[in-house]
């Protein structure tokens, strides 16, 4: 079985993430979103909320799962028998960091391949920080996130 993982904090998931996952899921038997628990970040949404938002957002994809992990992504990939890691690249500035991570992951476990994919150009400007900022300031994010995420952002920032 060819299995790929898509690691990230996904705080929140947006249409750029979903675009990459949808296309990568066509290339693999199974794609698994793995939500990172990162002590250095203070996420807007809890791990459970992020997992449920992803699950709701990808329910139309039959071969996609959602889980969480702590620690090294290559260790998690190995633990669940994944062959590869997919990472999104929006701009050239993303490449340097992602390249360094891919090389370190290869050094730690050369059986796990890192793949890079660019989102559709209509999502190239998206990142979770921008989505949160627009929503926080009353902007319309409906073109950038699934309806469940739009609602969750509205509830969060209305409190």
Image (cartoon, rainbow, N blue to C red):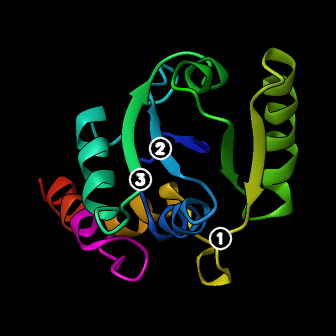
**Residue 140 at x, y = what percent?**
33, 81
Answer left or right for 11 relative to 107: left
Residue topped by disc 1: 119
Tell me the crowding category of disc 2: few under 14, some 14 to 19, or many 20 or more residues within 10 angstroms, Cα based: many
Instruction: Give the residues in magenta.
Output: 136-150
- SS state under label 1: loop
Answer left or right for 129 relative to 72: left
Residue topped by disc 2: 32
Q: In the figure, residue 20 lies in which quadrant?
A: bottom right
| Gap in angstroms between the C-alphas marked 2 and 1 | 18 Å
**Residue at 56 percent of width and 41 percent of height:** 5
Q: Earlier in the sequence, mark 3 or mark 1?
A: 3
Viewer-side label of 2, 1: 2
Q: In the figure, residue 99 lies in which quadrant?
A: top right
Quarter occupied by the N terminus? top right
Q: Earlier in the sequence, mark 2 or mark 1?
A: 2
Pointers 3 and 2 in contact (C-beta within 8 Å): yes
**Residue at 66 percent of width and 73 percent of height:** 124
Residue 120 in the magenta stretch? The answer is no
**Residue 86 at x, y = what percent?**
66, 48
**Residue 89 at x, y = what percent?**
74, 59
Residue topped by disc 3: 64
**Residue at 79 percent of width and 32 percent of height:** 101
Of helix, strand and loop, which mostly describes the magenta segment?
loop
């Amino acid at each position: 079985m060819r299995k790929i993982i898509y690691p990230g904090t996904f705080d929140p998931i947006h249409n750029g993430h979903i675009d990459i996952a949808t296309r990568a899921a066509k290339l693999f038997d199974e794609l698994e979103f793995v939500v990172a628990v990162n002590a250095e970040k203070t996420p807007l949404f809890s791990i459970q909320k992020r997992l449920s938002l992803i699950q709701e957002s990808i329910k139309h994809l039959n071969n996609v799962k959602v889980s969480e992990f702590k620690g090294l992504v290559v260790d998690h990939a190995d633990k669940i028998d994944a062959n590869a890691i997919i990472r999104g690249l929006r701009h050239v500035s993303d490449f340097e960091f992602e390249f360094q991570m891919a090389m370190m992951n290869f050094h730690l476990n050369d059986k796990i391949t890192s793949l890079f994919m660019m989102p559709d150009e209509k999502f190239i400007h998206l990142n979770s920080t921008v989505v949160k900022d627009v929503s926080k300031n009353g902007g319309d994010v409906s073109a950038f996130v699934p309806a469940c995420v739009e609602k969750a952002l509205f509830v969060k920032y209305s409190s």
